[in-house]
Amino acid sequence: MSPNQLPDDAGERITPVAHQPPTSAASAPTAASAERPFFWIAVALIALLLSLVILWLPSQLNQREPLRQIADAPPQQQVEVSAGRSEGEAEPAPGAADTEAVLAKRQTAQRIADALQLRRAELEKLAVERWAPADYQQVQVNAERASNYFANREFEAAATYWGKALEQSNTLLGQVEAVLKATIVEGYQALEKLNSEAAVKAFDLALAIHPENAMARSGMQRARNLPQILTLMSAAENHERADQLDQAMMLYREVLRLDPQSKAAREGVVRVGEAMQDWEFRITLSTAQQALADGDYSAAEREFRKADKLKPNDPVVREGLAELKAARLQQRIAALKTSAEQAVDKENWGKAVADYRKLIELDSTLEFAQAGLQRSRQRDELDQRLQTLVEAPERLYSKDVLASAWYTLQDARKIDNPGPRLQSQMEAVDQAIARARQPITVQLSSDSLTDVVVYRVGEMGNFEQKTLRLTPGDYTVVGRREGYRDARKTLSVRPDDGVVSLDIRCTDKI
């Protein structure tokens, strides 16, 4: 373009005029005519600016609104929008529109980069390089590529690689919970295998991911105590093998204090506890059996009951208790038999009867008890009859009683080897019978008018004096006289009375 030409987009072509300085006042109209082209040029420029303000500026503002919506969209959507416009959308105007499109791509890439930076910060806080180093390395590689593209102003490519890195980061974030759980499980499995180093390593990673996780913290504490626990477990097992059960139990419990979840220690406590219980059972059972053999049945029962609590329904204990019961039964039988025999020797027939009854209650097959009971009953009955006569000889004053007493005495005399009591009873009864049969002189007096009758003896008739020989006893004497009331008296005759006198006559007239 020559110096005398304007650009094509100036709107119109203007030919410059040569400028000459004025020479006089008469030339003023000529100067005014020369300034008119510049005036119109100014007017044209103003019109052009107005056209730009009215027509072009609104279109640019309308183009900026979609760009602002793209900038506010999520990173992935920004990548999609920057990759191409939707079908039917008008292409931006060349020039300024291209500049805005580049700016939009740059902003989209930057937004994705910012989001990726947040994700990477989260992942690094979660110790991602320890549990997914290869995957996180790929994130870093894509991020580095994106940075290079961004530096070379290839914003669309930068957005693509930052988007890939962001997607990979989100995937890793989604794996955190599963990784944490798997790491904790791995740590507890190592604890079960007593692998302290592997357990510490696993729980250290878990705590790096989640420092406040209770299971990981508890597991780490157990893992750190594991070397000491292994030492204690070894010592406890040695004591257990040597039957030093108290020491073994103490060490196993110490392990549980350090690690309440130790399966091996819990099993050790149960195992040693059972061994201690078995040892105590054997000692208790031996003590019970020795007491049984010694005849100390109270001690034997106490020890057998204690053994039964240690091992309920143990056959040896049941057998021991049955043997104890049988021994006590025999002891009771022997004691009652001795007591019954002593009662027989002492002629305490009532006690003998009671003892033999108890023996039969204990064992109805005891023949000696059955025979003893029968004999004791007979002797007890005889003893009671004789003793009654001894204590109340006046009963012999009755003829019926006297006759019965005589037969009783004959039964007693049939017994072989009578004891002192029976002999004494027979002598006393024999004497009582003799005295009861010994007649006593009785002097009856009357008025010869009264008719006298002595019951159980006979009619005496009328008399003034009559002498009778009566055996001891009580007799009823009745006097009758016509016109008079009957006279009735009791005549008591006793062996030691000598001569007995009685006056009987009717004196009350009717």
Image (cartoon, grey):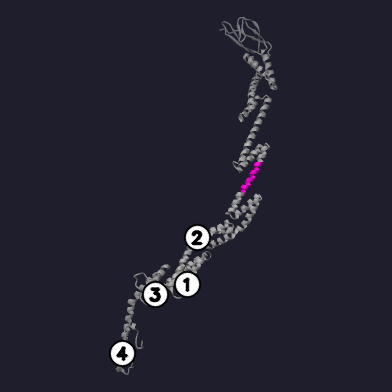
Q: Is residue 35 magenta?
A: no
Q: Residues within 10 Å of mark 4 (few under 14, many from 20)?
A: few
3 lies above or below 346: below
Q: CA distance from mark 4 to mark 3?
A: 45 Å
> Quick check: 122 above or below 189?
below
Q: Secondary structure at mark 3?
A: helix
Reading the chain from its start, which is encountered first: label 3 or label 2?
Answer: 3
Taking depth in this image into account, of 435 and 269 the one nearest to the observer is 269
Residue at image coords 48%, 71%:
144
The crowding category of the residue bearing disc 1, from other C-alpha atoms within 10 Å (few below 14, some 14 to 19, many at least 20), is: some
Q: Which residue is mark 2?
A: 178
**Numbered tag placed on residue 145 in the rendering:** 1
x, y percentage for residue 30?
29, 92
Q: Tag 4: residue type?
A: Ala
Gap between marks 1 and 4, in whole Å?
A: 65 Å
Q: What's the amino acid at mark 3? A: Glu
Residues shaded magenta: 272-286
Marks 4 and 2, how far apart in space? 89 Å
Q: Which residue is mark 3?
A: 100
Mark before the other along the chain sequence, 4 or 3: 4
Q: Earlier in the sequence, mark 1 or mark 2?
A: 1
From the viewer's perspective, tell me whether residue 442 is left or right of residue 217.
Answer: right
* Cα distance in 3D space between marks 1 and 2: 30 Å
